Image (cartoon, rainbow, N blue to C red):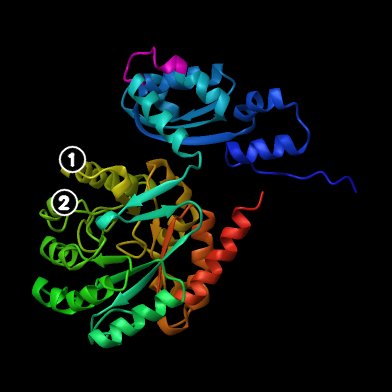
Amino acid sequence: MSGHHFITLEDSEQAKRVLTGIGADPAGVQYMIPKSLFRTIKLKKIPCRAANLLKQEMLSKGGEAAVCRDTIYGEGETDVLLSGTIKQFGLLLDKLKQQPFGLKTIAADLEAILNVLEPRPKKVRLTRGRELELGRRTLIMGILNTTPDSFSDGGKYLKPEAALEHARQMIADGADIIDVGGASSRPGAEIDGAREEMRRIIPVVEKLAQENVIISIDTFRADVARAALEAGAHLINDIGRLQMDPGLADVLAQYQAPVVLMHNRMQFNQEIPYEDLVADIIVELDESVRQAKQAGLTEEQIIIDPGIGFGKTQEQNLGIIKNLKSFQSQGLPILVGASRKRFIGAALELPVEERMEGSLAILVMSIMNGADIIRVHDVKESVRAARMTDAVMQNG
């Protein structure tokens, strides 16, 4: 047996470890790393004149480029698929920065994507001087629904005493964040008014704030967010990505509160079909990221969530998990909330109360594909699965 085998190099640190491990000349390791890492990047709706030049330049550097076969006529737009080593992309960028037809802008976009694919420590700056450290391990967000009609646990924690007891148990089980929600967003639910939402969550937030718990608020409403932040909350988890209440962005800026921007085509934009699932989600999330920055937030205050279950089919939900790495191109922390959702039940033909194993499988896949935070119902089991997955991912 020879022992020959295939390996995948994900980033510069891993390439350095492998090259050093075989005894490569230290002086040559840094030179070899860019040649060892292979990337494929998809560019959307590039003018054909620019795409022809882009293809020509990438091929001349030894890489590969694919465009629509009609691109040769120079009219309209085309998606472009570029494949090559980091070294080849670097040579391409140098040339594109000197070219017309908008290629300088494309070069900047390419460079940004290539840069964020390299792992680096990340943090989320919370209110009240606190931070979330990302990258060292996956963070677990425990779900606390104070609603009568949430799809999984509606009514169980409607009373503040029961909600607080459950939150304390989730913290004891290892939750890093408690996500408090006072209005159900399940399919078909009538969303309660702001006053009722505040009545449910504020007493819980006030108590948890006294216990040094990191508190997230699951709301899209500006008034609810303001009241919760005054009561002691640290971040806002917005299912509407700043589109369902125009005033929320200003509240976030006023309190310098971070936000989870979740993609959603259930509460709005239902009539818009997906043309390219991942690309369409990224475009809409980018719109909200720009809106948050314009309001006064920084990248250290923005988390993205592709919105599992919100206006997506079974196939689309599975596709998001499988292609989650693509969302790393936005350079922002990624949250995944798939716990006990309908697509898991459909895959396993199981009711909501029997979806823990399926939820844990999705958790593991999400972490392996780049998730930083996982939102869950079953905290103890999820923490154990996450720690084991982290251990594997951080080994070698």
Name the residue tied to disc 1. Answer: 294
Query: Is residue 136 shown left or right of residue 339?
Result: right
Q: Magenta residues?
A: 94-103
Q: Position of residue 143 (x, y in %)?
A: 35, 73
Q: Is 320 within the magenta?
A: no
Residue at x 15% of width, y 74% of height: 197
Q: Which residue is mark 2?
A: 249
Element assignment for label 2: helix
The reply to whether discs 1 and 2 touch (Cβ–Cβ < 8 Å) is yes
**Which secondary structure class fits the magenta region best?**
loop
Q: Is residue 227 above or below residue 107?
A: below
In the structure shown, which secondary structural element does the residue marked by tag 1 occupy?
Answer: helix
Q: 322 or 135: which is nearer to us?
A: 135
Left or right: where does residue 36 sit relative to residue 109? right
At horizontal 23% and vertical 87% (from top left) the residue drawn is 159
Q: Position of residue 183 (x, y in %)?
A: 20, 74
Residue 118 vertical placement versus 131 (above, below): above
Real-space CA distance between mark 1 and mark 2, rounded to the nearest whole angstrom: 9 Å
Quarter assignment of residue 30: top right
Residue 25, numbered circle: none
Which residue corresponds to the image point at 47% horizontal and 22% vertical from the top-left?
55
- The answer to whether 69 is drawn above or below residue 227 in the figure is above
Front residue of this view, candidates 248 and 175:
175
Tell me which corner region of the image, top left, top right, bottom left or bottom right, holds residue 8: top right
**Kind of residue indicated by mark 2:** Ala
Decide which of tag 1 and tag 2 comes sooner along the chain: 2
